[in-house]
Image (cartoon, helix red, strand yellow):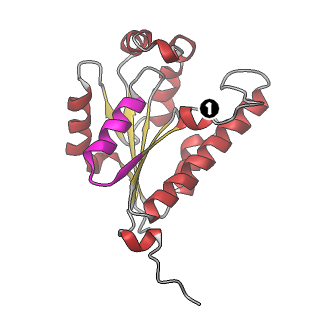
Amino acid sequence: MASNRPTLSDVAAPAHEAWLITGIPGAGKSTIARTLAARLPRAVHIEGDRLGEWIISGRVDPGQPPAAEAERQIRLNIHNQCLLARSYARAGFVPILDFPVVSHTGRLDRYRRALRRLDFYLVVLNPGRATALARDRARPEKTVAHLWVHMEDALRRELAGLGLWIDSAPLDVQATVELIVQHKPQALLASGAQ
């Protein structure tokens, strides 16, 4: 017998876009992603670092040995972020993900493939090393930028010309989000209609 109860997809029209906010640690990815999500009528923030912390026993943080297991857990994190993103999009929420994607292992391509049915937007926050380090010191619960600021060179090399790049060093959170909203077409990497 068919149920008359509405399903999640009955409650709201599906969302047709997904966003990825990236940059080096301390760039402001989580803060910007959360604020952008709050600006939209129906959106969810899927924070990569928090998802990685769901592993309680056996977690290997990025850059820690063994390297193969750390990379496997990063891939698992991206896979699960995208599963959540697709689920929320089907239920009518625009997913806003954040995670560093600089790596020779094709992390950005993993997002693009997994979210290929959605318009996929990329924002690269690039405030520079000094600003990222200062912001990182101001958040005592997660001070890690000093371990990863070297990623800035790889970020520029691997993601050059992709998505919307923002030098957020002189900008506050609201100004950065406003710039993202104003320049949304520049952030589009792939149309889900392809």
**Does residue 87 belong to the magenta stretch?**
no
- Residue 149 visible in image: no
Question: Which residue corresponds to the image point at 54% horizontal and 49% vertical from the top-left?
Answer: 111
User: Which one is nearer the viewer's eye here, 110 or 54?
Assistant: 54
Q: Residues within 10 Å of mark 1 (few under 14, many from 20)?
A: few
Q: Amino acid at mark 1?
A: Glu
Please report the bounds of the magenta region as a residue range: 29-44
User: In what quadrant of the picture does the N terminus appear?
Assistant: bottom right
Displayed quadrant of residue 123: top left
x, y (%) of residue 177? 26, 36
- Residue 142 visible in image: yes
x, y (%) of residue 87? 51, 60
As displayed, is residue 190 above or below residue 5? above
Identify residue for label 1: 53
Question: Which residue corresponds to the image point at 42% horizontal and 32% vertical from the top-left?
Answer: 30
Question: Which residue corresponds to the image point at 38% horizontal and 9% vertical from the top-left?
Answer: 134
Task: Give the mark count.
Answer: 1
As displayed, is residue 55 above or below residue 111? above
x, y (%) of residue 170? 23, 18
User: In what quadrant of the picture does the C terminus appear?
Assistant: bottom left
As displayed, is residue 42 above or below residue 140? below
Question: Which residue corresponds to the image point at 25% horizontal and 44% vertical from the top-left?
Answer: 39
**Does residue 31 belong to the magenta stretch?**
yes
